[in-house]
Image: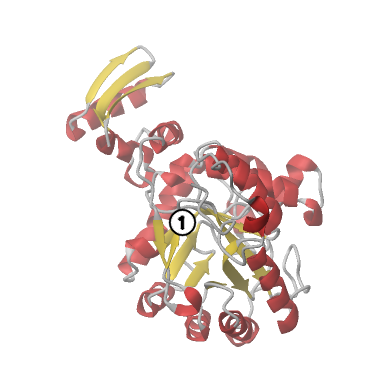
Amino acid sequence: MQALVVLLEEITETEREALVRWGAKAGADVLTGEGWALVGAPASRLAPLARPDRLPPGLERLAPELGRFLAGYADPPRRWTLGGGGGGGALSLDHPVLIGIVNVTPDSFSDGGRFARLDRAVAQAERLAADGCELLDVGGESTRPGAVPLPVEDEIGRVAPVIEQLVRRGLGPVSVDTRKAAVARAALAAGAAVVNDVSGLAFDPALARVVAEGGAGVIVMHMRGTPDTMDSLAVYRHVAADVAAELGAAVARAEAGGVARERIVVDPGFGFAKTPEQNFRLLDELATVVALGYPVAVGPSRKRFLGAATGRPVEDRDRATAVACALAWERGARLFRVHDAALAREALQVAGATTSPVPTGVDRDREREAPSGWNGTSPN
């Protein structure tokens, strides 16, 4: 990373003093004046200022701005290592990666009951894979606001048969959406390659060890409390900085449990313990989460905050979802959990073309016929 000079304006006296103290310790040059500071240092030394989990006290407000600035100079993760089951191994992150949602719950907020039968779940997974999803996420317990926890045996009974079928049919790597170690263990035995935990490994202390022992990939999401309490916990000083700091703690739980860094993805948790306004601020300042240095997944699909902006009911939010995914890509996200893969895919193609132009002479019709991957080719 190269040497940079950053001008910070409209800062408080407290922030100015904190920057001077930090600069003295970090070996950075800090020149200050009334309401401003000029900071010069290698980008590697500036990086902690964009990481709320390492941020010096008094500088929390600056993290989003610095995150956006430094994201352009960072070397983002290029691969995500998965488990060995179901076509796992690794996913390239040099293009947008779609994660297809396969809900086998009767009470999901969006499509509850539609795919609860095994044959319907498999058919939905096949559609998602055909539309470009590189990972299929199977969930058996609803995490909508106010959802009631499901007994472990019932959750295993919902997800394990579906995972087995998807793996048997070679539809690509499969993840299990669960907070519970016992469910994750059964899912990995059925062939899952990833565990997607909405609690960020906070709900079940044994889950990190199960992931590590199974050699699986993991997505740690930000949420406060549980689905039935999270709406009352949406109080933040600076939402993006606070979310990033709490994700840093989730990553620490994963690594303490033995999960290797290259197997970890972070998710800011759109719609979980956040108001509509906080969700949009978090989306705008997503680079603060990217600055943690782990691949970032987002799951805005059909969420309530999109309905608040568009006035659309839950079943008519796929266009808004596609726009949110494109905005997240521009801010550094690389994995996108969606219900409608086709719309999200097109939006991400356009967003990706702004930084990775589509080569001339590409046969788009041939690409659409590709059975898997991102248009059958790299977007580069």
Q: Secondary structure at mark 1?
A: strand
Residue 194 in view (yes/no): yes
Q: Position of residue 360 (x, y in %)?
A: 57, 41
Residue 142 in view (yes/no): no
Q: Residues within 10 Å of mark 1 (few under 14, many from 20)?
A: many
- Image point 78% across, 73% down: which residue? 114
> Which residue, given by chain and number where applicable, does mark 1 sit on?
266
Q: Is residue 336 left or right of residue 290?
A: right
* Front residue of this view, candidates 298 and 280: 298
Check the image and tell me how it is coloured: secondary structure
Where residue 302 sits, quadrant-wise, is bottom right
- Image point 75% across, 44% down: which residue? 308
Residue 263 against residue 159 in the figure, above or below = above
- Image point 36% across, 12% down: which residue? 34
Going by the numbered disc 1, the residue's amino acid type is Val
Where residue 144 sits, quadrant-wise, is bottom right
Q: Position of residue 235 (x, y in %)?
A: 56, 45
Q: Quadrant of the N terminus?
A: top left
Q: Position of residue 103 (x, y in %)?
A: 68, 71
Where residue 253 sits, quadrant-wise, is bottom left
* Front residue of this view, candidates 149 and 310: 310
Residue with the most extreme top position: 34
Labels in figure, total: 1
